[in-house]
Amino acid sequence: MILEGKKILIMGIRNKWSIAYGIAKSAYENGAKLLFTYVGEENKQKIEELTSEFKGSKSYVLDEASQDDVVKEVFTKIKEENGKLDGIVHAIAHAFTEDLHNDFIFTSKEGYSHACDVSAYSFVLTARMAKELDMLNENASLVTLTYHGSTKVLEGYNVMGVAKAALEASIRYLADNLGKEGIRVNGVSAGPIKTLSAKGIKDFGSILTVVEQKAPLHKNVTTTQVGNVATFLLSEMSEAITGQVIYADNGYNIMGV
């Protein structure tokens, strides 16, 4: 088990269909002790039921992942109760529905700022707070989630593509900043998956169909497969990899048409 004895914080778990859950399942099966953050005190019972299969895990409410003082308070509590971490998975992103359904040119200033704050700045903030609070063990690994819409135009992805592009640039700069301390930073670009978040993308079903037709492996990726890639990046098996975006999309990203 490649994460035996490792403590991993997974930020943004929502339900059993989420990529965060797939990562949690893979990490747990590979020996990790898990900690979680989630949105909404009203979701406490649902999250506790969801994570109950991960024995010894703990969950913490984090309602504003892009607010410095809020993240500092929650991270301070996590460290006080659990000690240092060996890895953090950032699975947080959001955009306003109207900014996904209208043409990108109509994105509002508020919508643009919101998508980038929640989806990209929150990862920078996560890294900074973890460093400032001395939360990370030597050789710790940070992993975030991105998508192909960061580099290619995908109808309906709109401002989220911009936010994910900012996130991917942040991966590289954070990798440089934290590398001197032996901390690695990478992203997983997952193929399209039927998650709750994906429902907000217009005509999402057609994207799944195209990927199945065009990807070299002619199938869509699963949360289990993405989870296994993230587990690899969290483990010492990937100790020479940092600043990278690893595609887990059955090869779709290599195709020209």
Image (cartoon, rainbow, N blue to C red):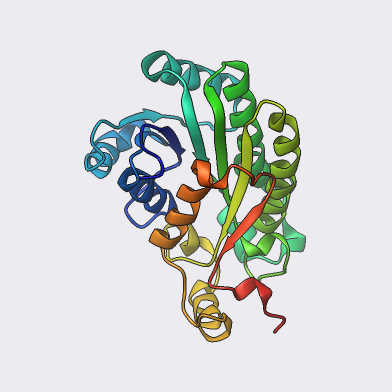
Q: Is residue 9 above or below residue 244?
A: above
Q: State how many labels appear.
A: 0
At 37% across and 16% down in the image, what residue appears?
81
220 and 140: which one is in front? 140
Q: Is residue 83 above or below residue 171?
A: above
- The image position of residue 240, as x and y in percent, is 64, 44
- The image position of residue 57, as x and y in percent, is 29, 32
Q: For this view, does 49 lie left or right of residue 97? A: left
- The image position of residue 35, as x and y in percent, is 37, 32
- The image position of residue 54, as x and y in percent, is 26, 40
Q: Is residue 107 above or below residue 30?
A: below
User: Which quadrant would the C terminus be assigned to in this image?
Assistant: bottom right
User: Which quadrant would the N terminus be assigned to in this image?
Assistant: top left
Residue 110 seen = no
Q: Is residue 65 above or below residue 25?
A: above
User: In the orientation shown, which residue stands out farthest toward the top?
Assistant: 80
30 and 147: which one is in front? 30
At 43% across and 62% down in the image, what residue appears?
225
At 48% across and 16% down in the image, what residue appears?
76
The quadrant where residue 13 appears: top left
Q: For this view, does 27 lie left or right of residue 180? A: left
At 42% across and 57% down in the image, what residue appears?
196
Residue 32 seen = yes
157 and 110: which one is in front? 157
The quadrant where residue 170 appears: top right
